Image: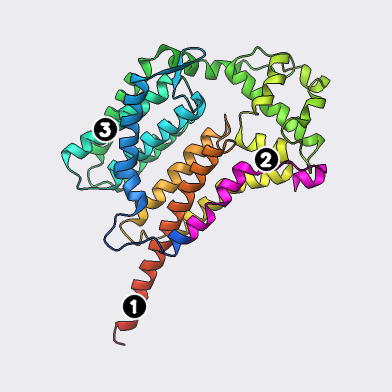
Amino acid sequence: LGQAFRGEFFLGNFDPPLRILLCVPIFLAVSQGWLHRRDATPVVASWLKVILPLTLVWTCFYRVMWPVAWEGGRYTTRFVDPLSFGSLCLMFALLSLAGLWLFKGRSRLAQVGVVVSVACGVFLSVTSGSKTGWLSVPVLAALGMMLAVRHAAQPRRWLLGGAVGLALLAVLVLMNPLFVSRLSETVPEALSYHWQSMNPDGSTQIRISLWRMGWFYFLQSPLGGWGDLGWRVLMDSPALTVFASQFTREFAAHGFHSEIMTSTVRSGVWGLVSSIGLFLVPWLCSRRLSAGWLTPLLKPTLWFVWIVLLHQGLAGLSTEVTALIFQASFFGLCLSVGLGEAVFQYRMANAAASDTTSKTPA
């Protein structure tokens, strides 16, 4: 719609959305049970228990043996930028840790393996130098502590385990001076931001300026947006030069470091609605399915969806999480499989309950 209002058509802008659209058949197949096998482990359970932990261990081995250093001593793989790499490794670690909590009765060896994989994920995220997505750590930690106090049979044990885990996390973080420096600069840079005068080119200050610039561009073309670089005609407007340096104004060509803002500038109000809906609609659907925890696998499946939405949503405050094809494909696959399995399990539980009710004598 934004392109229609601008009177232009660029097929490349449809690449990431089409990857998410292609996940709709996967959702339909999974939700209808077409891929279900009675004696097979569901996909989400396999991801949480095996695939994600093994992925982190292998990636850590690969990255240590064949490192790729980006500018500033930040490490990643050859294919993924540090922001995306650090955020995804952290999300994999959080999901693996959730799997350890959600699936009981696993062997000691399996539990130790998951703990090692979580440490690998945190290590990879820290050495990438990326702060992206780290806001989800205190949010999930607080939520986990609250659930432990309310529902755990031994809340003190869970609270002690959480405290030990946070202490180990702090040790891993403090081992990397670059990450500690970037993390410690966040709050001072935000508090020292100048709203009516020029700002230095600090990481946090640039992001705040990019949000303000994006809002300015949106107000100039709310229906059509600007496409990828159309906003450059207003780049030197006095409303922007008062607080954003030349470097910051040109840096926006790489994106506005916000999932919602980048989509809004590109496609106008249609991008704003679609980017919010991408997170809001799956959350509303999953909340509706969560009543009663009707099956043993429904709870971990929904927690998988919620952690993905929470982490990617918070990461999207400081970077784009669906702008690249691989990002959009992965995000769409996670949601389509997670929600598809939740819908199928919900339907199966309702069908079983209906059969039981119909067979009960009046």
Task: Using the numbered discs, state the Cα–Cα distance from disc 2 to disc 1 in whole angstroms.
Answer: 49 Å
The disc labelled 1 sits on which kind of residue? Answer: Asp
The residue most toward the left is: 108
Q: Which is closer to the viewer, label 3 or label 2? A: 2
Taking the image as drawn, is residue 320 in sight? Answer: yes
Q: Position of residue 350 (x, y in %)?
A: 39, 70
The label shown at residue 13 is 2
Please rate how many residues cluster around mark 2, counting C-alpha atoms within 10 Å: few if below 14, some from 14 to 19, many from 20.
some
The disc labelled 2 sits on which kind of residue? Answer: Asn
Q: Secondary structure at mark 2?
A: helix
Q: Are marks 2 and 1 in contact (CB under 8 Å)?
A: no
Q: Quadrant of residue 265?
A: top right
Residue sitting at 29 percent across and 86 percent down? Answer: 361
Q: Secondary structure at mark 1?
A: helix
The label shown at residue 115 is 3
Task: Using the numbered discs, state the Cα–Cα distance from disc 3 to disc 2 in whole angstroms.
Answer: 40 Å
- Can you say whether 182 is above or below 144 in the image? above
Image quarter in which the C terminus is found: bottom left
How was this image coloured?
A: rainbow
Q: Position of residue 177 (x, y in %)?
A: 41, 12
Residue sitting at 78 percent across and 26 percent down? Answer: 232
Q: Position of residue 131 (x, y in %)?
A: 49, 24
First in sequence, mark 2 or 1: give its number: 2
Q: Which residues are magenta?
A: 1-28
The disc labelled 3 sits on which kind of residue? Answer: Val
